[in-house]
Amino acid sequence: MVFVAEDDGEIVGALGIALMQLAVWLVCLAGAVWVGGGLLGIGWLQDVNPNWRDVLAIVAVALPTYLFMAALMTIVGSTFTDVQEAQQAGPFFFFLLFLPTYLAIPLIQHPHSPLSVGLSLLPVTSVMTIAIRSLFLQVPAWEIAASAAIASACGVLAVWLASKAFRMSLLRYGQRLKWRDLFARRPAPA
């Protein structure tokens, strides 16, 4: 049995939303292939045969990455005092998540380069990078395992930091939580 503290409920909620969104996408995709290929007779949809190894690899990396990102956003959200400041940080996260899309051409041209491997191992960019690379080659199993392990370790650490940040920010109502206080052994008095 898993016990979740009240301050981790935000992370669990974000993770639940991400999993629900993933499930809806998969159902819509399967429905589109079924309707388009089976009922409407669209040729290219009749020949859809997903590579389940790649799908499972992306899911194995995506789950701990979603956990990490939800915890990271909770940490950042706990350091702001108003909603407007928190909304201004959002585009930074989206830029990091979509960085592999902006670098798609080098990733496609050199799928085994240090840039491709590095972005596959970095928790924030791993899902999109592995998805792009898996379209053109079979990503080595060690990279998928290492990426999932790194994202899991970062996710656990980020959840711990998020719960600490959330607790500390509740004690400092109206005051900004400083990053150095978050990493200090003894928190500064509120």
Image (cartoon, rainbow, N blue to C red):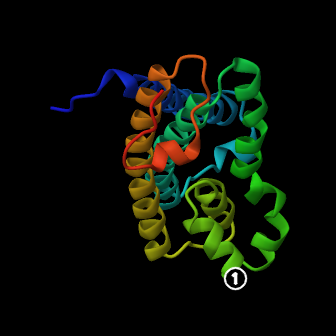
Residue at 65% x, 28% y is 80
Residue of label 1: 113
127 with respect to 11 (left or right): right
The answer to whether residue 146 is above or below residue 57 is below
Q: Residue at x 46, y 24 (%)?
A: 10
Amino acid marked by disc 1: Ser
Q: Is residue 11 visible?
A: no
174 to the left or right of 92:
left
Q: Is residue 57 above or below residue 74?
A: below
Badge 1 crowding class, 10 Å Cα cut-off, few under 14, some 14 to 19, many 20 or more, is few
Residue 133 visible in rendering: yes
Q: Position of residue 95 (x, y in %)?
A: 77, 47
Residue 118, x across and y down, in percent: 62, 73
Q: Nearer the viewer, residue 60 or 97?
A: 97
Task: Please tell me in which quadrant of the rendered image residue 154 appears.
Answer: bottom left
Q: Quadrant of the N terminus?
A: top left
